[in-house]
Amino acid sequence: MALTIISLVCLLMVASGQLNKDNKIQRDIYFMKADTSDFNDNPKAIQTLNNLNIDNNLLAALQKASSNLQLEDFYTVGLWNYCWGDEQPDGKQVIKDCSPRKNSFWFDPVEVWKLNQTGIFDDKMDKALNAAHKFAGWMFASYMIAIVLTVAEFLVGLAAIFSRWGSLVTTIVSTAQSIFVFAAAVTSTALYGSEVGIIESTMKVYNIHASLGKNMMAWVWLAVAFSTASGFFWTISICCCSGKSPHKKIKAEKTPYTYERVASPYVGASAGPAPAMAPPAHSTSGSAYEPFRHERV
């Protein structure tokens, strides 16, 4: 039960990333971070790129986005939305604002940086982006289902306190929950890991960098670990350690039934055996003594 609660806390931390720009804990929880500060704020960077004869359509599009203030210093991506901000002269990064929350959200740099209006991407890139969008929808659904199943696992787990049948049902729910948690973790790691790789390989020359969020990845895989552990112990509880002990029959020792004289209330318990009663005599006139018979003389 404790492992289930910890797994739920980890999943809620994942879902809370980037929801509140004023909360430091939530600000530091993100799947991916794109840093464009060197391209945006350093005029020498563009001049250096020009000196390297990197004068293609992508560079022109990025320069246009930068001049139109559409390219921020950095972007952090959460489960529901993304945030952006400026880098201060002292190196401190401050979030300015965040995008609206959206179901099945994913960070599309082509759309965010307005690069889709330049026509520099071919059909293969469009297909790759569409595939990534589908993976993002599956990832979001997996996290939502995992959270719901974790709550259900906790509630059903209360029945395990009273019976092993409750442990069996809880184990079934826990197995489904572990599958969805693992699927969500793998999908999100693969999706944003690939996106980081694409940005690094295609835009590193423009001094644009990307990296995975360490805090987010830690919460994601801790949720997987605790979910798997809770499922393991719920499975064990089917066979042993159940809250309800098996029914035990108490057998009383049988003793031979013998007759024992009960003490007379009129005679002390220490009195000896009662004298034998004489058989009643038949009443005959003038012979036997009849104590309750009186005749008038």
Image: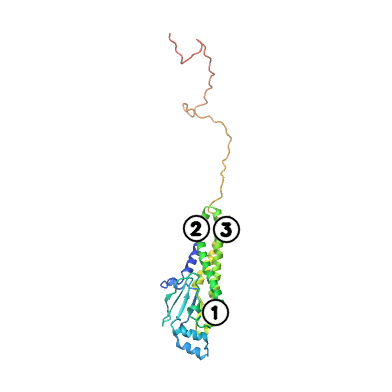
Q: Amino acid at mark 1?
A: Ile
Q: Amino acid at mark 2?
A: Leu
Please identify the residue farthest to the top as the structure is shown.
297
| Number of other residues with Cα within 10 Å of mark 2, as a class: few under 14, some 14 to 19, many 20 or more | few
| Number of other residues with Cα within 10 Å of mark 3, as a class: few under 14, some 14 to 19, many 20 or more | some
Pick whichever, 13 or 60, lies toward us.
Answer: 60
**Residue shown at 56% from the left, 65% from the top:** 179
Say which element carries label 2. Answer: helix
Q: Which residue is mark 2?
A: 155
Distance from label 3 to label 1 (Cα)? Answer: 44 Å
First along the sequence among labels 2 and 1: 2
First along the sequence among labels 3 and 1: 1
Q: Nearer the viewer, mark 2 or mark 3?
A: 2
Residue 3 in sight in this render: no
Residue 66 in sight in this render: yes
Which circle marks residue 236 in the picture? 3
* Quadrant (top left/top right/bottom left/bottom right) for the C terminus: top left
Q: Nearer the viewer, mark 2 or mark 1?
A: 1
Which circle marks residue 198 in the picture? 1
Pick whichever, 225 or 159, lies toward us.
Answer: 159
Q: Position of residue 190 (x, y in %)?
A: 55, 73
First along the sequence among labels 2 and 3: 2
